[in-house]
């Protein structure tokens, strides 16, 4: 079957003709209708293998090995089998009520494969816009009613009330190219000079030239363009919609997305698993306390996400190319109009397509939605720089309403394989601020206080975590991403955005941050080799002391036996004819080999005792930082020398609020506390600070395995201001 579509439109005395040619192949078709049942007419149809591909496409541009299926690499869409049923069915809303007959539509797709590239998506966009223009010209102008339509929440009861869709297996492949060209982009620098000028942007260098950055590719010209493939595989996707009950339900058994890069079309050079989710379920119903409130539930067994800068740049480049294709298609439809007029018309059309404003009463009702969350396992990992990676793991996420709060269980946060934060249970929620009534916002913005409650929180600073190097790597990564995205934007889609629009103020404002922790432990981890040496030093000291005593006792005994051969020993039995017994063994004291063997036996017993003591040591699991060090991988810390410094607090209550005046207020505090800062007018690049109010029932500071703590206190209270400032380098 060959489908050819030609669209034409006469605009501004010019004719534009667009062609989109598709080849389709359908192997089998079966349609049956039955009206003998009491339910009325029922229609059943089955479509066999269906394939669609572009007839005029250059097949050499597609990598068959990348798509993984030689016969389907040229297809746009491939469907194995589709079954569609339409007719009335009996349903039960509850066990007490009688079954009700409603009209339903169900579709089952056995297998589906979608193969996309930029050229194909560009053709789709051009054809869709052509269809849109053609339909507008055929329909003609429509009169707009000034009165807003009243949307009834209840369904009319006509038409299809039940929709069911089941997709057993689906694979989506997106093939593209990414690269980096040598270019020069503006590189303004944001600096905070404090009292000397505040926060300024430096866009000119010291010699008066514009501050720019050179973006250059580090690979050879042969590999300037990398081919990549983003694949998404879905298993058992179910969708059901009940218009009568106003409910929606989506179930997904498994989904996985993989990103691969290729120098050629034979083997991938990198492979990244972006998304891996299992047993996803989403249910939405209207109801609850208010009539228009939406009650939603999201549950999942496992969700794994990963972010990498290469994938981020590839997706950004693909989005820019699609925006350019959409922009060019709209320009072609507008004919000889100016580019500025086209952009304004597009914006006006977007504004017209927006939904009309809803009265405030309706908007308030819609905002009272309930969103419940139940996730058993969440894993998030990210490559944040050169040699810097971070992972976050949560064993359980639960919330009856995520707009109010979320409960996290088994929280772990790792940096470069080292554990930084660990908590068995933590709850993050928000409450209306108490100070909102006293200092009400004239704009009517809601002020919320964020509350973090924890059962036990363990914060560990690993012994070899290079914080400064990590900070530099993060800063370099953010700067590189910003410059590369700017370079790609200037080369692919250099259309400036209208920044003259004033941003609407947020309707939600931040009040303060509160911590309620039952137990908090902060540790500075001991270096493994020092802890190992300290632990084994005490063990060796004990065993060597016992060894020395045994050897001295043996020497004294032998010397006495040689001087007085007729003497007897009650402990070691008696000797006969210059022979003695030690531990029921006959020993000749005049034989040097026998004495030497006795000494070796004492050494063996000592080593065996030392080995047994080492096996009985309770080792500290550690943060995991020492696992990456080959020299210290075998040194395990004991629980007695696990940390260098440990600070623990119970029933900790901390409240953090903003300092009045912001950064200017923090600089004023620094000038009062530090006379050097005031005299020399020291500028600062970063400022962090807050008003702090702390209450605790106990506070203990311990150094290594010392018997007595460095500090111990009960019923502690503290209040003041905490400011951390970094000077301009």
Image: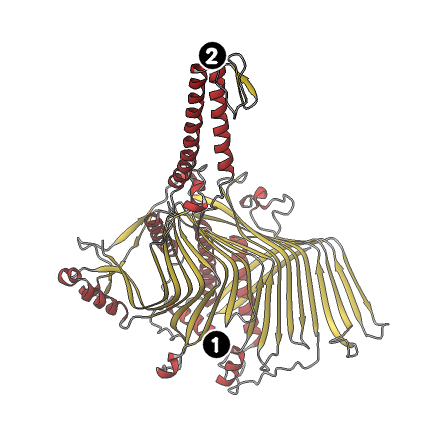
Q: Secondary structure at mark 2?
A: loop
Q: Nearer the viewer, residue 57 or 310?
A: 310
Q: Quadrant of the N terminus?
A: bottom right
Q: Residue furthest right?
A: 36
Task: State left or right for residue 601 relative to residue 30.
Answer: left
Q: Which mark is residue 401?
A: none
Q: Quadrant of the rendered structure where residue 437 is?
A: bottom left
Q: Position of residue 472 (x, y in %)?
A: 32, 50
Q: Which residue is mark 1?
A: 352
What residue sits 77% from the left and 78% below the top? 96
How many circles with numbers are drawn on the protein?
2
> Please, is residue 285 above or below residue 3 in the view?
below
Q: Position of residue 310 (x, y in %)?
A: 44, 49
Look at discs 2 and 1 and give the one toward the viewer. Answer: 2
Task: State left or right for residue 689 relative to residue 92.
Answer: left
Question: Is residue 173 visible in the rendered structure shown here?
Answer: no
Q: Which residue is mark 2?
A: 590
What residue sits 48% from the left and 29% below the top? 607
Q: Nearer the viewer, residue 414 or 18?
A: 414
Q: Position of residue 77 (x, y in %)?
A: 63, 54
Q: Position of residue 420 (x, y in %)?
A: 42, 53
Q: Nearer the viewer, residue 217 or 259?
A: 259
Q: CA distance from mark 2 to mark 1?
A: 114 Å
What residue sits 67% from the left and 75% below the top? 243
Crowding around mark 2 (Cα neighbors within 10 Å: few <14, some 14 to 19, many 20+) is: few
Crowding around mark 1 (Cα neighbors within 10 Å: few <14, some 14 to 19, many 20+) is: few
> Marks 2 and 1: CB-CB under 8 Å?
no
Q: Quadrant of the rendered structure where residue 151 is?
A: bottom right
Q: Earlier in the sequence, mark 2 or mark 1?
A: 1
């Amino acid at each position: 079957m060959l489908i050819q579509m030609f669209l034409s439109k006469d605009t501004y005395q010019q004719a534009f003709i667009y062609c989109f040619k598709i080849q389709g192949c359908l192997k089998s078709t079966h349609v049956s209708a039955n009206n003998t049942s009491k339910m009325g007419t029922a229609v059943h149809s089955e479509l066999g293998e269906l394939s669609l591909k572009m007839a005029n496409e250059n097949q050499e541009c597609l990598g068959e090995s990348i798509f993984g299926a030689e016969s389907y690499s040229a297809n746009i869409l491939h469907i194995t089998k589709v079954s569609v049923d339409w007719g009335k069915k009996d349903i039960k809303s509850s066990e007490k009520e009688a079954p009700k007959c409603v009209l339903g539509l169900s579709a089952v797709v056995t297998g589906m494969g979608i193969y996309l590239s930029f050229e194909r998506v560009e053709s789709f966009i051009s054809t869709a816009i052509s269809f849109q223009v053609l339909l507008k010209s055929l329909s003609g102008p429509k009169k707009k009613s000034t009165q807003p339509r009243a949307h009834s929440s209840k369904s009319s009861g006509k038409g299809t009330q039940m929709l069911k869709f089941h997709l057993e297996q689906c694979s989506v492949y997106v093939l593209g190219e990414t690269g980096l060209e040598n270019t020069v982009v503006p590189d303004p620098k944001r600096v905070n000079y404090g009292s000397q000028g505040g926060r300024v942007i430096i866009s000119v260098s010291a010699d008066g030239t514009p501050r720019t950055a050179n973006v250059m590719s580090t690979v050879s010209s042969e590999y300037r363009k990398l081919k990549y493939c983003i694949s998404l595989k879905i298993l058992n996707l179910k969708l059901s919609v009940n218009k009568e009950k106003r409910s929606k339900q989506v179930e997904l058994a498994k989904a996985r997305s993989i990103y691969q890069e290729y120098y050629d079309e034979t083997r991938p050079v990198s492979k990244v698993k972006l998304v891996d989710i299992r047993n996803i379920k989403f249910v939405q119903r209207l109801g609850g306390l208010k009539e228009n409130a939406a009650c939603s539930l999201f549950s999942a067994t496992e969700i794994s996400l990963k972010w990498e800068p290469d994938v981020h740049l590839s997706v950004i480049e693909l989005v820019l190319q699609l925006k350019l294709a959409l922009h060019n298609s709209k320009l072609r439809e507008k004919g000889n109009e100016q580019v500025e007029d086209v952009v304004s018309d597009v914006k006006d059309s977007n504004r017209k397509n927006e939904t009309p404003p809803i009265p405030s009463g309706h908007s308030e009702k819609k905002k009272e939605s309930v969103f419940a969350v139940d996730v058993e396992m969440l894993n998030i990992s990210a490559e944040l720089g050169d040699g810097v990676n971070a992972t976050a793991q949560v064993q359980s996420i639960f919330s009856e309403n995520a707009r109010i709060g979320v409960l996290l269980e088994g929280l772990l946060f790792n940096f470069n394989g080292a554990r930084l934060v660990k908590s068995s249970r933590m709850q993050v929620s928000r409450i209306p601020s108490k100070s909102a009534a006293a200092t009400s916002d004239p704009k009517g913005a809601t002020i919320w206080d964020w509350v973090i409650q924890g059962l036990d929180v363990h914060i560990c600073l690993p012994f070899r975590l290079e914080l400064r190097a990590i900070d530099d790597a993060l800063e370099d990564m953010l700067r590189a991403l910003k410059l590369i995205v700017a370079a790609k934007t200037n080369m692919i889609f250099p259309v400036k955005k209208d920044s003259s629009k004033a941003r609407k103020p947020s309707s939600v404002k931040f009040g303060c941050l509160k911590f309620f922790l039952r137990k908090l432990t902060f540790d500075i981890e001991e270096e493994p080799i020092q802890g190992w040496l300290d632990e084994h030093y005490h063990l060796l000291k004990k065993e060597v002391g016992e060894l020395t005593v045994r050897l001295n006792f043996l020497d004294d005994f032998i010397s006495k036996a040689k001087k007085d051969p007729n003497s007897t020993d009650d402990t070691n039995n008696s000797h006969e004819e210059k022979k003695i017994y030690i531990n029921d063994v006959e020993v000749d004291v005049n034989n040097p080999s026998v004495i030497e063997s006795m000494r070796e036996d004492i050494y063996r017993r000592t080593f065996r005792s030392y080995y047994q003591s080492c096996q009985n040591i309770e080792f500290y699991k550690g943060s995991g930082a020492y696992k990456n060090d080959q020299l210290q991988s075998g040194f395990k810390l004991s629980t007695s020398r696990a940390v260098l410094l440990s600070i623990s607090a119970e029933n900790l209550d901390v409240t953090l609020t903003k300092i009045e005046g912001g950064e200017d207020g923090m600089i004023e505090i620094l000038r009062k506390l530090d006379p050097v800062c005031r005299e020399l007018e020291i500028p600062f690049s970063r400022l962090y600070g807050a008003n702090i109010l702390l209450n605790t029932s106990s506070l203990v500071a311990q150094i290594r395995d010392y018997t007595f703590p460095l500090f111990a206190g009960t019923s502690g209270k503290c209040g003041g201001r905490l400011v951390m400032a970094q000077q301009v380098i």
